[in-house]
Image (cartoon, rainbow, N blue to C red):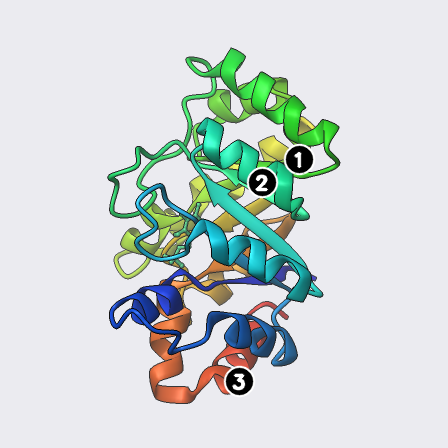
Amino acid sequence: MTKLSVNINKIATIRNARGGNVPNIQQIAQDCERFGADGITVHPRPDERHIRYRDVYDLRPLITTEFNIEGYPSRSFIDLVLAVKPHQVTLVPDPPEALTSNAGWDTVRNADFLREVVAEFQKAGIRVSIFVDTDIENIKNAAKTGTDRIELYTEPYATDFPKDKALAVAPFAAAARAANEVGLQINAGHDLSLENLKYFHENVPYLAEVSIGHALISDALYFGLEKTIHLYKEELK
Ligand code: PXP
């Protein structure tokens, strides 16, 4: 069964707009779990424009499913993750000012750096996933960093899905097969939605987990959070 990890960054964005504690992200994280989410994802950025470092500490004891922290492995990020000890850390290559993650790692150019960071997290018992696109050589090189998983960057799939879904999903299915062959587990995320998730899940093998934020939180405005989480879980059956 592919797991659904709900990315709650958007909730923190709304909270931060007014400076108080509404909506309460701790309550919402727990409610997501109660409504069926298999995990909670947060992406603390250095400017703390949505999830703050403090939030990550506060959430840790409350999460009873899987806690996934994603981010660029700066020294401060690494120290945060080592202190909080989530189940999984997802490494993304985006610079601090990026609006959102917009590319996967170049696992050749960053091979030494990634190998060191992956080892540091694994020594602390934290599963590591690294964010990559569908380039097969790049994925084979990802395995050489020692990472446990990759997360496939699905924005290109979401963009191309309305034009030709078979064409859009083909590189992801091939990438997943290649990753499985070199012993990597597979996550996926970015711009997955109620429109495109089912087809992705049906056509990409070995999918351990999807992490979804923007579309899911937007859908919750119409359907409510509980119903929305059920709808996403249905797509993964
Ligand atoms: N995976 C990674 C690495 C991300 O940076 C994000 C966005 O924070 C997501 C998944 C979730 O993307 P979306 O918000 O489009 O569902």
- The answer to which of 222 and 116 lies nearer the viewer is 116
Q: Which mark is residue 81?
A: 2
| Secondary element at image label 3 | helix
Any mark on residue 151, and which? none
- How far is the residue under mark 3 from the one under mark 1? 33 Å
Query: Which residue matches tag 3?
Result: 226
- Position of residue 206 in the picture relative to residue 225 (left or right): right
Q: Percent position (x, y) of residue 221?
A: 34, 83
Name the residue that disc number 1 marks: 180
Q: Is residue 96 above or below residue 193?
A: above
Q: What is the spatial separation of the Cα atoms under label 1 and label 2, in whole angstroms? A: 27 Å
* Residue density around tag 1, few if under 14, some if 14–19, many if 20 or more, within 10 Å: some
Percent x, y of residue 107? 47, 20
Asked which secondary structure carries label 2, the reply is: helix
Give the residue at x 40% y 77%.
23
User: In this rendering, which labeled residue sits more in front, label 3 or label 1?
Assistant: 3
- Work out which quarter of the rendered image holds the N terminus and state it: bottom right
Q: Nearer the viewer, residue 165 or 6?
A: 6
- Depth check, mark 2 against mark 3: the one in front is 2
Q: Residues within 10 Å of mark 3 (few under 14, many from 20)?
A: some
Decide which of tag 3 and tag 1 comes sooner along the chain: 1
- Amino acid type indicated by mark 2: Val
